[in-house]
Amino acid sequence: MPPVIDLKKCKKCGTCDLHCPLDVIHFDKRKKLPNVKYPDECWHCGSCRLDCPVGAITIRFGPEMLCL
Amino acid sequence: MVASAELLGEVVKTDVLVVGGGLAGNNAAIGALEKGLRVLIADKSSIDRCGAIAGGVDHFMAYLGTDTWDTREAYLEWVGKIARGTVNLSVQNAVFCRELNAAIDRMERIGCTLKQTDGTYYRTISMGQPGPYFINFNGKQLKPLLAREARRLGVQTLEKCAISGLLTHDGRVTGAVGFNIRTGTFYTITAKAVLLATGNTNRIFENPTGLPFNTWQCPANTGAAQAMAYEAGAKLANMEIVRITLVPRGFSAAGLNALTGMGGRIVNAAGEEFMSRVHPAGVRAPRFKLVQAVMKEIAEGRGPVYVDCRHLSVSEMTHLKKTLGYDKDTLPDFIEQKGIDLAKEPLEIMPSEGMQGGSSEVNSSGIMIDENTASTVPGLFAAGDCSDQMRCVHICTTGGYLAGKMAAEYAKSLEKIPKVKMSQVTQLKKKTFAPLQASGTTSHRQFEDTMRKMLWQNAGPARNEKSLTVALEKLEELGTYLKDIGARNYHELTRVLETEQIWLVGRMMCTASLARKETRFGVYHHRTDYPETKPEYDGQIVLWKTDQGIETEFKKLNYDVIPPL
């Protein structure tokens, strides 16, 4: 399961929302935090992790891919 | 009566509209901007990370003149060999060879050097090449650097924008309509030239991992250009090809090239390097041969199959580990989370999902283009994987740029764009937003899953007249359910649009496959009822829309003469 966002480190810049090529991450305007809204549409490209300015994102693969 | 302002939504005027801001589209925008024109890129994401090279890329094919295999002539001869029947050498010469030097300079200038830190090129050989054409480089920032350059030159962007249809007037393309995938804002875009660069078609075949977005190329690339150009009356070519590659088991990630290029061996359960049994070039055989061999090995019970890099020297392994994340940023994480050290154990691989795309590393499937990257419809240009002649980093870079220049030249030749036809916008807008009012009794995921399974069985790695006819019948039946697919928000609306595009590409693919009564490129077009490759099919299957449906014709191509530069 991709990306894992550390909400404590997050500085709410919205870059992960903007840069995801699949529109998977939606910045929740009420909570003012990013949400991985469509995790099963993640392509595991790494763009969110690459462009997060504070390194708040890690990529965690799940058994559906690791144990196939 | 709806007021025209409300109907049109947000109206945007530009000289050159580029649909798809990926590698080819971004280079195209730069080409058009350098000609001094207004350029607008519309993309479903942001131009910083969209498309196939989002998280990076590591290979740029080029001849550099160091040896007899390293020349333009040798390259074109190899191209004519590995893509005979789908590649047009004159177009390849125009979209790649003529633009190569400028492309290498442009890469340097924008800050994405192809060289290693010591100033040399690291070149690797694979996929049937006569010499190491692949320059291995760090392309992790290539997409953001291209985006930065386009912005520096003054590009306008419509990001998080899905283009849903082309505007036409008197047989000419004059713009497009689309919507914002978050807010639903409708856009009417008028342009003197439209350049499509939306890549190949993915999510069209059953995914062996069961995860439809776990794709080798970008899963957001679902044949938008192919579908829209078809509706606008353009001719398309090479649509019969099913592309399959080899990937780490569980993760449809790019990177095999790097592993085999640096000397990785492909072995079966018994540790046998079975490729040398199958092809004289062994692991350096053309991709479709590798895929076929692995499929056979697994089907005959000699799997699992692995890529084994344990024999690499310390410096080779260091280079491999350092660069493995260039093409797929998260591949090193995947391997690590599997608990594998490539220096100590082999990595299991598998055939990837099928996709509709190019038969080789040098050409593609889609809108038929001439040497000026023009489609058969005036005002419509195509670049990259959605055209029929541009594939891979090298040609998307060179050919994308050329397409931008050509679209700009065309735009300059026009005095003005005709006014928008309200009836056309009305019709396209209604079609675009229809899923929001649909019954929702079918979901886009259900529809696609069924279509993917059906197409893999009937139009996948083995096809025959009956299976392809059945596929077309089932697609027609499936088509009656398209109107029931619902969308509850604009993200889902985007997905429904993608489903419709994939469905249309599926119809084109099956129709073109029926027309090519031979087998070519092994599993990439395998007709079990016509198992031989026939010289009379040394050319393209071309298709276009008529009132009766999809029409096809054969276009013979010349491979005897290497075109002059």
Image: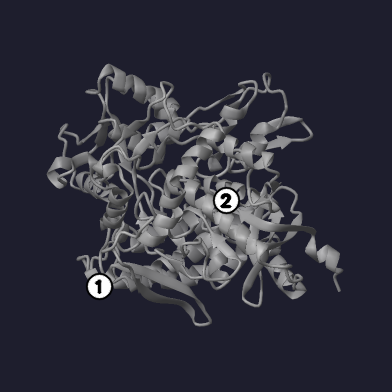
**Chain under disc 2:** B
Residue B291, horizontal then vertical, whole percent: 27, 47
Q: Amino acid at mark 2?
A: Ala
Relative depth, front residue between B376 and B333: B376
Residue sitting farthest toward the top? B314
Eye-nearest disc, 1 or 2: 2
Report helix, strand or loop for mark 1. Answer: helix
In this rendering, is residue A53 above or below B160? above
Residue located at (22% from left, 65% from top): B533
Question: Are discs 1 and 2 located on one and the same chain?
Answer: yes
In the picture of the structure, the residue carrying the numbered disc 2 is B28
In the picture of the structure, the residue carrying the numbered disc 1 is B536
Q: Of the two numbered discs 1 and 2 on the same chain, state the one appearing first in sequence.
A: 2
Residue B183, horizontal then vertical, whole percent: 75, 49
Q: Amino acid at mark 1?
A: Glu
Left or right placement of residue B538 versus residue B384 in this view: left
Left or right placement of residue A21 versus residue B64 in this view: right
Q: Say if residue A44 shows up in the picture.
A: no
